[in-house]
Amino acid sequence: MTSPQEVQKNKASIYYGTPATIAVPETHHRSKVSPVQEEYMPPDTLIQHLGRDNIPISYSKNIRTSVCFDNQCRLLVAKVHWNPTGRYLGYSLPEGEFLSKKEHDPFSVQEYERLNSLLADPNLPLGSISYNELVLESQAPLVGIDGVSGATNQDLLAYIVEGAAYTTYKLYQILYGPDRQFIENWTRETLNEAFVIEALKSPEIADQLWLLKVLKGRLSEFPIARQQIAELTKSPNFSLADNALQAFSERDLEDDQITNLLFDLFEMGDYGKRNRILALLESSKTVNTISIKRLSEHVLQLESPFQVRVIRLFEKHKIKNSAFDQAMKQLSQSNNDFVAQEARSYLKLR
């Protein structure tokens, strides 16, 4: 099978697409039957394209369907491509094939580009409406559009290639229908560290966010990638940094290097990041030596609610640390009566 990158280089074929999640060469592929079953048609096959180390690099599906203009039909032969995260990758046509509009006029370059732009947007209403809503049926075949004789709903013209409503709608429905979720699940099933490392390099933040959500609570399975994700917690992109931090679980604090990286973030981070890291410690069965040392050194600089939570954490685990004891003596004289009371209670237990 020819990958989208190879198709693009083949001047005899047509390919339009978006940035690839994984930029490694294809070495082999696997196939599964698509969950989509169209009336009077045999089920299609979804292809998983893989690179070295069984890295899933893309998915594809061949399409053969009729596109009709005023009772005249033409067979649409095309292929759609997904990234392994389920994100739209592109569409391609084999040699000699082309897309057409009413009166079978071939697409112009601009119309191919517009179709690509529309298909790349996962938020269009085309994924949630019926074709009848897209088209206003007319009693007489005055205006020909592919699929029915009628006029396109004026409110939805911004979401189609003019004169090719059915083609646009059909491709969009395929790309964002059940096949997409099937592909995402397939990637999850074949997840390995080589894929995770490559996917973290994706030029699209949407891919990285998808991956971080999939990896939540599973980072201990991918120790090399986990180091990279720890660095992502410092990203200037709030959404990326937050999702990277949310991916960690209390098990990850068993690794000293990860613990130090997270405490670097804890000491310089905002309220939300501190809250998340402290919550990980609170849910841990034990508190390791590095955590004890870093909290003892930094407790005086924390906001009052965090100081109280750290004191209770030390009490819960019956932690003994001379530096922390000295900090508690200072906090016992705090102007915040609640903090001072918590510190004095801790010292009494010592």
Image (cartoon, helix red, strand yellow):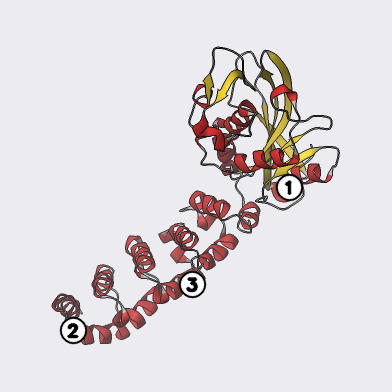
Checking the image for residue 334, the label placed there is: 2
Depth check, front residue: 16 or 132: 132
Q: In this image, 102 relative to 204: left or right? A: right
Mark 2, secondary structure of its residue = loop
Can the viewer see residue 127 in this picture? no
Q: In this image, 307 relative to 228: left or right? A: left
The span from disc 1 to disc 2 (Cα, nearest Å) is 60 Å
Residue type, label 2: Ser
The span from disc 3 to disc 1 (Cα, nearest Å) is 32 Å
Dot placed on the residue nearer the N-terminal end, 1 or 2:
1
Checking the image for residue 213, the label placed there is: none
The residue sitting at 15% across, 75% down in the picture is: 338
Residue type, label 1: Gly
293 up-or-down from 83: above or below: below
The residue sitting at 48% across, 60% down in the picture is: 244
Checking the image for residue 261, the label placed there is: 3
Checking the image for residue 51, the label placed there is: 1
- Labelled pair 1, 2 in contact (Cβ < 8 Å): no
The span from disc 2 to disc 3 (Cα, nearest Å) is 30 Å
Depth check, front residue: 220 or 131: 131
39 up-or-down from 268: above or below: above
Count residues near mark 3 (Cα–Cα under 10 Å), then give few for <14, some for 14-19, many for 20+. Answer: some
Residue 271 location in percent, x, y?
34, 69
Depth check, front residue: 75 or 89: 75
Depth check, front residue: 67 or 89: 67
Residue 12 location in percent, x, y?
86, 38
Residue 350 location in percent, x, y?
20, 80
Dot placed on the residue nearer the N-terminal end, 3 or 1:
1
Image quadrant where residue 197 sits:
bottom right
